[in-house]
Amino acid sequence: MAGFNSSGDSDPQLVFVYGTLKRGMANHAQLAGTPCLGTAQLQGFSLYDLGPFPMAIATGDPQHRLEGELYAVSPQLLEQLDRFEGAPRLYQRQRQRLGDGRPVWLYVGQPRQVRHVQRIDSGRWLKPPPTSAPPGPGPSPGPKR
């Protein structure tokens, strides 16, 4: 995806991840061992649960926040993440600024993509990765049989 790397060189780019790319989540391996630089929040975005993954939508409302993690990635890895995230068809990669002024890349969707989907009020996606362990006792998401 040419044109996304605003610096035009090989400088690492900060990426804000909020879903399956986070540590301990199903697709974290896409970050190829890149160390997490810490957690962060972005204001002005709502988070929606699409089942296997979440989607952030710009709202402009500072009361709406995303919680996520930061990674410094190479331009090559950023291009790989674009393909993985389906950018620009499913998500659009946008430049945003953290509260401390640092620029980050963020994958966002369009409001039409989430019009029938539950918003995650906390702004934090907590779905565990799939496991091979047998299901344990606990509440069932569907009717009891």
Image (spheres, rainbow, N blue to C red):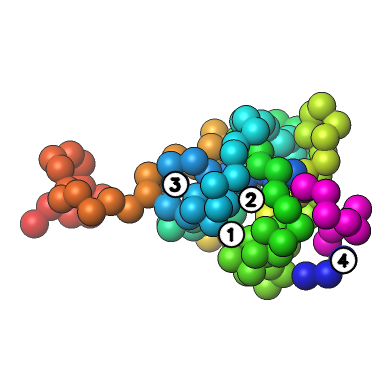
Q: Which residue lies furthest to the bottom in this view?
A: 89
CB within 8 Å, label 2 to label 1? no
Residue at 53% from the left image edge and 60% from the top image edge: 116
**Nearest-to-viewer mark from 4 and 1:** 4
Cα distance between the residues tagged 4 and 1: 27 Å
Q: Which residue occupies the foreground of this view, 33 or 42?
A: 33
Which mark is first along the chain, 2 or 3? Answer: 3
**Residue identifier under label 4:** 3
Q: Which amino acid does label 1 sit on?
A: Val
Residue 81, placed above or below residue 118 = below
The answer to whether residue 9 is magenta is yes
Residue 39, placed above or below residue 18 = above
Label 2 element class: strand
**Residue identifier under label 2:** 56
Residue at 78% from the left image edge and 70% from the top image edge: 1
Q: Residues within 10 Å of mark 3 (few under 14, many from 20)?
A: some
- Give the overall secondary structure of the magenta segment: loop
**Residue identifier under label 3:** 25
**Nearest-to-viewer mark from 3 and 2:** 3
Q: What residue type is labelled 3?
A: Met
**Residue identifier under label 1:** 114
Residue at 17% from the left image edge and 39% from the top image edge: 138
Label 4 element class: loop
Cα distance between the residues tagged 3 and 1: 22 Å
Range of residues picked out in magenta: 4-13
Rendered location of residue 135, percent (x, y): 17, 48
CB within 8 Å, label 3 to label 2? no
**Nearest-to-viewer mark from 2 and 1:** 2
Label 1 element class: helix
CB within 8 Å, label 4 to label 1? no
Which quadrant would residue 71 be assigned to in this image?
A: top right
